[in-house]
């Protein structure tokens, strides 16, 4: 997000906090489609994805006075949306009819071609994200994630302390998450998270 976009977003959030409906509408128009796609990738139902987006913006309107204009509004929205999706999927897991509906739709949703494309996108995304790391952090990260080595093993191999490895991994993960959330398809980001890459 550019500096200008960040500034404009902060202005809109400030207006929203004062109850400005036009600012609310502008923010809705800006982010609702991305949130819908994110929800659809998780719940595999257009109807439920739309409902979740509506619920998210309802929560934003109700809690508008407590918003923090200095924080990323986009990240805030995606956090609420993720939580709503997880809440919905937990409900679906305990409701036989809903569970069967979601499972059936998810099977139709993921054709083999889509899965192949998704895997290719995932590999490109991983490489692009790794390019953001310094050489030292990248080596530590890849030893941990690709080779499955413990922090102690990495420390011994590289001649550094386990605490240094832990700190470098923490910073690497923070860099990767921020890059991916700000710049990429959130569905792919979640896939990387669930595969324990992030």
Image (cartoon, grey):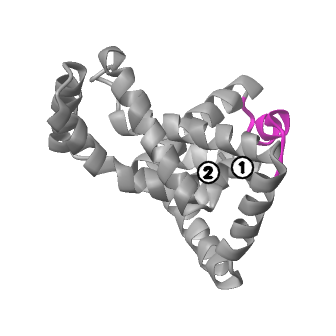
Say if 7 sits above or below 126 in the image. above
- Left or right, residue 51 beside residue 2: right
Residue 194, numbered label:
1
Question: Over which residues does the magenta segment extend?
Answer: 148-160
Q: Which of 65 and 50 is in front in this view?
A: 50
Residue 151 in view in this figure: yes
**Main SS category, magenta section:** helix
Residue 4 in picture, x, y percent from top left: 14, 42
Residue ID at (65%, 84%)? 113
Q: Quadrant of residue 73?
A: top left
Say if 101 sits above or below 136 in the image. below
Helix, strand or loop status at disc 2: helix
Residue 175 in picture, x, y percent from top left: 50, 40
Other-residue count near label 1 (Cα within 10 Å), few / some / many at <14 / 14–19 / ≥20: few
Give the number of callouts.
Answer: 2
Say if 166 sits above or below 172 in the image. above
Residue 190, numbered label:
2
Circles 2, 1 touching at the beta carbon (< 8 Å): yes
């Amino acid at each position: 997000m550019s500096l200008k976009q960040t500034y404009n977003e902060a202005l809109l959030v400030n207006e929203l906090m004062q109850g400005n409906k036009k600012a609310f509408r502008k923010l809705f128009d800006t982010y609702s489609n991305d949130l819908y796609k994110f929800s659809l990738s998780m719940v595999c139902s257009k109807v439920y994805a739309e409902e979740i987006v509506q619920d998210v913006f309802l929560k934003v309107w109700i809690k508008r006075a407590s918003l923090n204009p200095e924080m990323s509004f986009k990240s805030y929205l995606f956090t609420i949306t993720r939580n709503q999706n997880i809440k919905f999927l937990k409900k679906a897991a305990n409701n036989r009819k809903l569970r069967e509906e979601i499972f059936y739709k998810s099977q139709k949703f993921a054709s083999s071609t889509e899965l192949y494309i998704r895997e290719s996108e995932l590999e490109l995304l991983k490489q692009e994200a790794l390019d953001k790391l310094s050489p030292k952090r990248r080596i530590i990260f890849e030893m941990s994630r690709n080779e499955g080595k413990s922090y102690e093993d990495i420390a011994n191999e590289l001649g550094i302390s386990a605490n240094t490895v832990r700190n470098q991994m923490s910073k690497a993960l923070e860099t990767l998450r921020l890059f991916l959330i700000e710049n990429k398809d959130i569905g792919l980001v979640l896939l990387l998270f669930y595969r324990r890459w992030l």
